[in-house]
Amino acid sequence: MSREVFLYDPPERFVAGTVGLPGRRTFFLQASAAGRVTSVALEKTQVAALAERIDELLDEVVRRTGGNAPVPAVAPADVADTAPLDNPVEEEFRVGTMALAWDGEEQRMIVEAQALVELDAESEEDLAEAEERLLQDEENGPPMLRVRLTGAQARAFAKRALDVVNAGRPPCPLCSLPLDPEGHVCPRQNGYRRGA
């Protein structure tokens, strides 16, 4: 079976968003262009890590080029996207592995999100080898979303993604665990219930 690659070069829109209420949200990456929409599900921590790494990579590009790359220092307001995810949100796959790269010739950020795959391995070395083979297998690997973004689009994506991650339940001021509307059992209060 050949690999299915959802390519957006360039996307009209590439955002992180959620479906559901805080505490029960499902996180998605969604790319769209020319009437096509692709949504892939992932974990909150993956969204946060992706946004942080995009910002770090863009900062490194600016540093290495001496500020000559077309990468803004902060997300431009005119590229900000605060609209909800496009409906219907239909999950193509759940993300397992993500990769980032900077194409210096085209001045584009490349974001790849590959479907989660169960691997059988007897050791950590075998597992690492199997993962590397999957990433390199352009022909028969698992489904992948590949998006090419300008520096401004990448900064705007990272800002929105971090905003989405931080829009969840507020943290408990004592233990930093998320507070539910009903409160939570706070370990710093020896299990006494703390209200929201």
Image: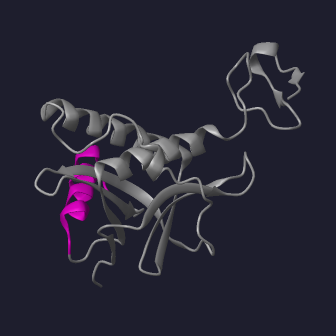
Percent from the top left, x then y, of residue 23?
Answer: 72, 45
Q: Is residue 48 magenta?
A: no
Percent from the top left, x then y, of residue 164?
Answer: 59, 45
Residue 50 seen: yes
Q: Is residue 184 left or right of residue 81?
A: right
Report the number of numbered marks. 0
Q: Is residue 185 above or below residue 145?
A: above
Q: What type of secondary structure mainly makes up the magenta span?
A: helix
The magenta stretch is 121-138
Quadrant (top left/top right/bottom left/bottom right) for the N terminus: bottom left
Say if 189 sits above or below 59 in the image: above
Q: Quadrant of the C terminus?
A: top right
- Residue 106 is situated, as x and y percent measured from the top left of the image, at 15, 58
Image point (14%, 32%), residue name: 64
9 w.r.t. 179: above or below: below
Answer with left or right where residue 59 lies relative to residue 107: right
Q: Residue at x 57, y 41 (%)?
A: 163
As drawn, the residue found furthest toward the bottom would be: 1
For this rendering, which residue is in front, 125 or 178?
Answer: 178
Determine which quarter of the picture holds residue 74. Answer: top left
Q: Does the magenta portion include 135?
A: yes
